[in-house]
């Protein structure tokens, strides 16, 4: 079975802190994605990566950056956390040219 | 531009009754459509997809989805609902990005099955 893991299930941070969310997949997938999920808005794509060291902006990249130094790991960085970044963050991966995505359990981030 | 719409935020159904969760789409070209389910405090799980072929797609846990090109719809159905089906359901459509295929998600429909 494909396994996508995220470093934390729940995280509480303060405004202005730098926040790292880690995602690891164990199936050698080329593509990895970061979404945020908010009630009434569904899932919105923040960033994605189709190869090591490659990254592309999604629909809402402002306030976020990403890093992909190894194929299995994709990190989402909040340079200076703000309260409007309180959300559920979901990581996903899939092989190149595949259709379905495989999701991690999510990280619920609260910024105070 | 691609989009999906889930017109109902909430669907309630009695246990044992059939359920339908609605989805309509707008996409240029042939649509690739998906249903995902999310249980509380969990990530999304893939249920089923329509790529081509039969309009009625059968997936996991007794769910099926019917593709209707003329109505641009892809409704999720199950003949007999279970309490354990209570969850958040997302419809999605595929679109192509630089180097990858991505999914555009609807806003979700919360299904509650009443015992």
Image: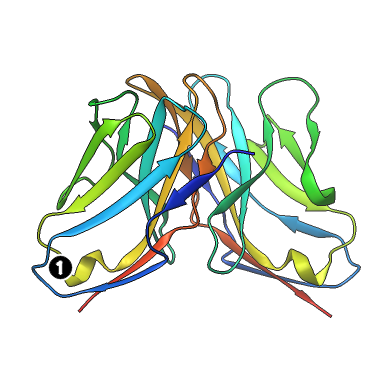
Residue on which the image places disc 1 = A82
Task: Name the quadrant containing residue B95.
Answer: top left
Which chain is home to disc 1? A
Q: Quadrant of the C terminus of chain B?
A: bottom right
Tell which of A53 and A49 is nearer to you: A53
The correct choice, above or below, for A110 with respect to B90 in the image is: below
Residue A68 left/right relative to A81: right
Front-most of B18 and A70?
A: A70
Does B52 sit left or right of A64 as displayed?
right
Residue B115 vs residue A108: left or right? Answer: right
Identity of the residue drawn at 15% across and 75% down: A14
Q: Position of residue A85 (x, y in %)?
A: 23, 64
Q: Quadrant of residue A40?
A: bottom left
Query: For numbered disc 1, what is the local secondary structure?
Result: loop
Residue A52 in the image: x percent, y percent? 29, 25
As drawn, is B55 to the left or to the right of B24? right
Where residue B68 sits: x, y (%)? 72, 34
Query: Counting other residues with Cα less than 10 Å from the Cα at mark 1, is it few (<14), some (14-19), or many (20 or more)?
Result: some
Q: Nearer the viewer, residue A34 or A38?
A: A34
């Amino acid at each position: 079975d494909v396994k996508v893991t995220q470093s934390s299930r729940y995280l509480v941070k303060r405004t202005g802190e730098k926040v790292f969310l880690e995602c690891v997949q164990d199936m050698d997938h080329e593509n990895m994605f970061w979404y945020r999920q908010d009630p009434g808005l569904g899932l919105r794509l923040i960033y994605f990566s189709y190869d090591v060291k490659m990254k592309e902006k999604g629909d809402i990249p402002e306030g976020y950056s990403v890093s992909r130094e190894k194929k299995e790991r994709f990190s989402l960085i909040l340079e200076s956390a703000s309260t409007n970044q309180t959300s559920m963050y979901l990581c996903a991966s899939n092989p190149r040219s595949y259709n379905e995505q495989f999701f991690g359990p999510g990280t619920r981030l609260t910024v105070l | 531009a691609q989009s999906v719409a889930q017109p109902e935020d909430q669907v309630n159904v009695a246990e044992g009754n059939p359920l339908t969760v609605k989805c309509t789409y707008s996409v240029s070209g042939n649509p690739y459509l998906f249903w995902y389910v999310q249980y509380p405090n969990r990530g999304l799980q893939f249920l089923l997809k329509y790529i081509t072929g039969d309009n009625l797609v059968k997936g996991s846990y007794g769910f099926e989805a019917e593709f209707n090109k003329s109505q641009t719809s892809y409704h999720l159905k199950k003949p007999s609902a279970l309490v354990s089906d209570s969850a958040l359901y997302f419809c999605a459509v595929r679109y192509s990005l630089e180097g990858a295929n991505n999914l555009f998600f609807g806003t979700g429909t919360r299904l509650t099955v009443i015992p």
